Image (tube, rainbow, N blue to C red):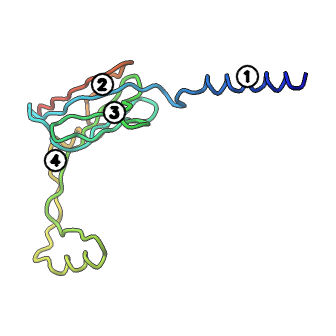
Amino acid sequence: MMIQARYGLMVLMAGLLIGCGGSDHEETAPVTGKVTLKGTPVTKGRIAFYPSQGRPAMGAIQSDGTYSLTTFDQGDGALLGKHRVTITASETVGGVSMGTSVEEELKLAMEATSYEQAKTIWLVPQKYSNRKTSKLQAEVVSGSNTHDFNLDE
């Protein structure tokens, strides 16, 4: 009788483990797309999808303007539902170059002929980089999603 009880318990535990084999987070769907400014691909930056609740999805913008989102695991996409979208694409110019060590940074700073302050150049309008000022939205549904963003200003 005791052996049967143990066997039954083992079968029950195995069934529970198999049943729980799925992910331990909300459902996501793959999201890819392209970011352009006035029809020209944006060649670097980051894109983020912010759901009303839950973890945001993010992705790097590639040199051809394409992106793929990740929320939990590489390339898994974004949570299902409506999202506010931000796009941040900028570069820093000027300023003193950074070294790989404190000593190198001090040496570079002492050799600098001018102390020009670093300046941020926005590759897309800065308003798209903030959730409060970006009006970009997207809805993610089950299955593959493609969301292209052609920024016109």
Image position, residue 74 (x, y; %): 38, 37
Image position, residue 109 (x, y; %): 20, 77
Of the image marks 4 and 1, the number of the one nearer the N terminus: 1
Image position, residue 88 (x, y; %): 24, 43
Image position, residue 120 (x, y; %): 18, 54
Of the image marks 1 and 3, the number of the one nearer the N terminus: 1
Of the image marks 3 and 4, the number of the one nearer the N terminus: 3
Badge 3 crowding class, 10 Å Cα cut-off, few under 14, some 14 to 19, many 20 or more, is many
Q: Residue at x 15, y 29 (%)?
A: 150
Q: Quadrant of residue 144?
A: top left
Looking at this rendering, what residue extends furthest in the top direction? Answer: 142
Residue where numbered disc 2 is placed = 138
Left or right: where 125 falls relative to 81: left
Q: Residue at x 27, y 29 (%)?
A: 32
Residue where numbered disc 4 is placed = 122
Badge 4 crowding class, 10 Å Cα cut-off, few under 14, some 14 to 19, many 20 or more, is some
Residue where numbered disc 1 is placed = 12
Q: Nearer the viewer, residue 58 or 8?
A: 8
What secondary structure is found at the residue carrying circle 2?
A: strand
Residue where numbered disc 3 is placed = 49
Residue flagged by tag 4: what amino acid is it? Trp
In three-dimensional space, the C-alpha distance between marks 1 and 3, rounded to whole angstroms, equals 40 Å
Total label count?
A: 4
In three-dimensional space, the C-alpha distance between marks 2 and 1, rounded to whole angstroms, equals 43 Å
Left or right: where 128 falls relative to 58: left
Looking at this rendering, what residue extends furthest in the front direction? Answer: 3
In three-dimensional space, the C-alpha distance between marks 4 and 2, rounded to whole angstroms, equals 23 Å
Q: Residue at x 28, y 79 (%)?
A: 103
Front label number (4 vs 1): 1
Q: Is residue 105 above or below residue 38?
A: below
In three-dimensional space, the C-alpha distance between marks 4 and 1, rounded to whole angstroms, equals 59 Å
Residue flagged by tag 1: what amino acid is it? Leu
